[in-house]
Amino acid sequence: TYVVTDACIRCKYMDCVEVCPVDCFYEGENMLVINPSECIDCGVCEPECPAEAILPDTESGLEKWLELNATYSAEWPNITRKKDSPPDADEHKGEEGKFEKYFS
Ligand code: SF4
Ligand code: F3S
């Protein structure tokens, strides 16, 4: 599966949802997540994200994000259409420590 990481937080560009063939993105207030049991591993979303927030879970050190994606995709609503990103999205692009600062 692919997972959304903290680079998405407060950026929410949502280009990812437009390309996913199985519509497996879910929307929280500050970030999106992928449902790992629905993702078919096609990889098309990864290069679409301007924040480089999407990674394959085969990369090391992503256990925390895999767990977070699994947990919140069961709680948050499905999203299939791109909406407006936060007005200050670009200011948060590449910012360090976004999970600790903003994820609640
Ligand atoms: Fe959707 Fe493919 Fe990305 Fe999985 S890898 S979330 S199926 S676009
Ligand atoms: Fe987030 Fe990137 Fe999608 S910033 S909403 S994972 S395009």
Image (spheres, rainbow, N blue to C red):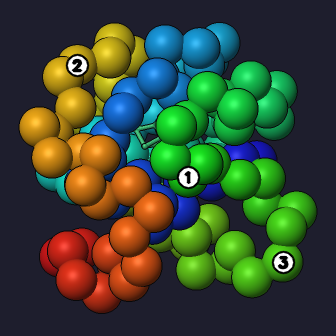
Disc 1 under 8 Å from ligand 2? The reply is yes
Label 1 or label 3, whichever lies nearer to me, is: 1
* Three-letter amino acid code at the position of disc 1: Ala
The residue that disc 2 covers is 83
Picture layout, residue 49 above or below residue 89: above
Q: Please rate how many residues cluster around mark 1, counting C-alpha atoms within 10 Å: few if below 14, some from 14 to 19, many from 20.
A: many
The residue that disc 1 covers is 53
Image coordinates for residue 84, horizontal then vertical, percent: 18, 22
Pick out the residue farthest to the left. 87
Q: Please rate how many residues cluster around mark 2, counting C-alpha atoms within 10 Å: few if below 14, some from 14 to 19, many from 20.
A: few
* Three-letter amino acid code at the position of disc 3: Ser
Quadrant showing the C terminus: bottom left
Q: Secondary structure at mark 1?
A: loop
Disc 3 under 8 Å from ligand 1? The reply is no
Quick check: marks 2 and 3 in contact, CB under 8 Å? no
Residue 16 visible? The answer is yes
Picture layout, residue 60 above or below residue 26: below
Give me the residue at 15% from left, 46% from top.
88
From mark 1 to mark 3, how far is it between C-alphas?
15 Å
| Dot label at residue 60 | 3
Looking at the image, residue 79 sits to the left or right of residue 34; the answer is: left
Image coordinates for residue 94, horizontal then vertical, percent: 45, 63
